[in-house]
Image: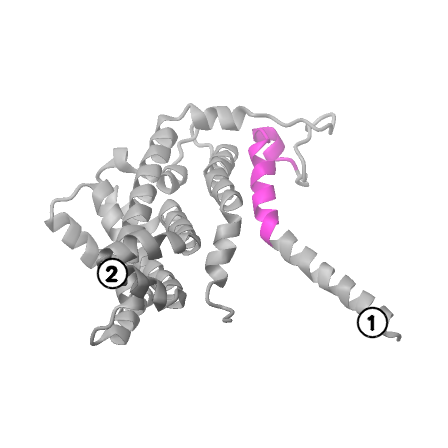
Amino acid sequence: MSKSMTKLVNRVVFWIIVGLIMLYLLFPFYWAVNSSLKNENQLMMTPTTFIPRDPVTKEFSPTLDNYRAVFQSDQFIRGLRNSAIVAGATTLLSLAIGSFAAFALGKLRFRGKSSALYIVLSMTMFPQVTILPGLYAVITGLGLTAIPGMILSYLIFTLPFTVWVLTSFFRELPIELMQAAQVDGATPFQAFRLILLPLTAPALVTAGLLAFIAAWNEYLFALTFTAIEPASRTVPVAIALFPALVARQEPFGEIMAAAVVVTIPIVVLVLIFQRRIIAGLTAGAIKG
């Protein structure tokens, strides 16, 4: 086989593998959209259809009734609002606290710095279910309501990752930038706020978006902390407890429509910040 033929075969195999991976990753979302556009009769059709079809004529027949039902649900709208508050606050606190910690771990000299960094990273090793009972007791003992309790709880698994990502980025920034700022009379905090922090924008976007996604999608803590405060339920809990419009009916269509609506903000954020996300993830991968 000639060299050009080998290169062509390798390229074809490569794109086949990429296509299979994309199919594997995107098919669940496609199926959620497909199911959300079907009514109850279409969902019960056998064999199932890959597009919404009329049970009698077999023609393409989508419906938006599931989306209307979702947006008419006060429980779902309230869940969206609560999720936006909890995820937004968690992200802002993670970035604010994490950037200070990362600056200290990445640029300042003090005893035990490496140990502190690995202790922070080790906090992500514990499964959520193992710390939930003790954490719930602490939150209850402090007398916090569900939303502040969820925000503080989510920091347990968003803050360590944020600190780790930002520390790696701060380490790669030239120390001469901070030294030049100090020569000009800037304090370490001013050098951090005015010089170094703006340069970490890609890492901030990456860490912030991942923290937002983690808080937006979290279910276990949200279900536990809102058990006695139904008005504070976030959108994953609201979807899991989505009421049926008809008694003794499992609302598959409404659940899928709600899942699509919840996924759209994440997709939009990723598309808007994709360049900065890639820059943040690859920061420090290449030197020189």
Look at label 1 and name its amino acid.
Answer: Thr
The numbered dot on residue 194 is none
Mark 2 crowd level (few <14, some 14–19, many ≥20, 10 Å Cα) = few
8 in magenta: no
- Residues under numbered marks 2 and 1 in contact, where contact means CB atoms less than 8 Å apart: no
Residue on which the image places disc 1: 6
Residue position marked by numbered label 2 in the rendering: 131
Residue 154, relative to residue 52: is it above or below? below
Q: Secondary structure at mark 1?
A: helix
Residue numbers of the magenta segment: 25-45
Q: Nearer the viewer, residue 41 or 147?
A: 147
The residue type indicated by label 2 comes to Ile
Whole-percent x and y of residue 72? 42, 23
Of badges 2 and 1, nearer the viewer stands: 1
Question: In the rendered view, would you say 203 is above or below 239?
Answer: below
Q: Is residue 127 left or right of residue 285?
A: left
- The chosen color scheme is one colour
**Residue at 14% in and 48% down:** 140
Report which quarter residue 202 is drawn in: bottom left
Give the camera-side residue of 238 and 214.
Answer: 214
Outermost residue to the right: 1
Q: Which element type, helix, strand or loop, lies under badge 2?
A: helix
Q: Quadrant location of the N terminus?
A: bottom right
Sequence-first disc among 2 and 1: 1
Q: Residue at x 27, y 49 (%)?
A: 93
**Residue 245 in view (yes/no):** no
